[in-house]
Amino acid sequence: MSTYEELLQRAKKASAKGAEGGRFAMPKLELMDEGAKTIIKNFAAIASTFRRKDEHIFKFFLKELAVPGELKGGRAAFAGNFVQRQMDEKLKEYARIFVLCYTCGKPDTNIIAEEGQEKLKCEACGSKGRIRA
Ligand SMILES: [Zn+2]
């Protein structure tokens, strides 16, 4: 093995180690009741943390909660009064399916289309997994 390759190997190991040190912290939803609606105040921030389009997460919530809703000005509103725990569970579920790598669990992923399937491609470990929504 050449010196250059050794250096590369060492660098790879070091960066993998470093990334494992900090486990991904699930962002916290800021909820607010507005009459008979539940508002997620920091929806845009959540989307940017996950590096996903807010519409994509919004559609997931609509489907999961099975109620009408509205996405406006970085906030999401859903008909019905939902408690924090319910909404946190939905967000966790979304992250599990669409954000966190199926292999290494890191959030540095992209959704790609390949062979007519949606896949989650990880920038950290390079693995690809079919999205089962
Ligand atoms: Zn990975």
Image (cartoon, grey):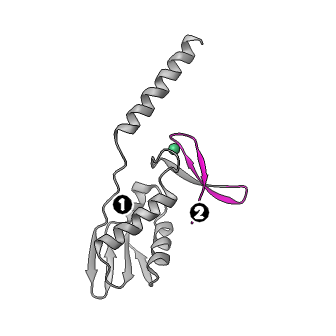
| Residue 75 rendering spot, x and y as whole percentages | 36, 72
Q: In which quarter of the image is residue 131?
A: bottom right
Give the number of the disc on residue 132: 2
- Image-based side of 118 in relation to 66, left or right: right
Whole-number angstrom distance, CA of label 2 to CA of label 1: 25 Å
Kindly identify which residue carries mark 1.
Answer: 45
Residue 6 placement (x, y as % from top left): 53, 16
Work out which quarter of the rendered image holds the N terminus and state it. top right
Q: In this view, does 30 lie above or below 101?
A: below
Amino acid under disc 2: Arg
- Membership of 116 in magenta stretch: yes
Whether label 1 lies within 8 Å of ligand 1 gets the answer no
Q: Does the magenta stretch include residue 47?
A: no
In the displayed image of the protein, which residue is found farthest to the bottom?
Answer: 36
Of the image marks 2 and 1, the number of the one nearer the N terminus: 1
Residue farthest right in this picture: 115
Which residues make up the magenta segment?
Answer: 114-133
Q: Nearer the viewer, mark 2 or mark 1?
A: 2
Tag 1: amino acid: Ala
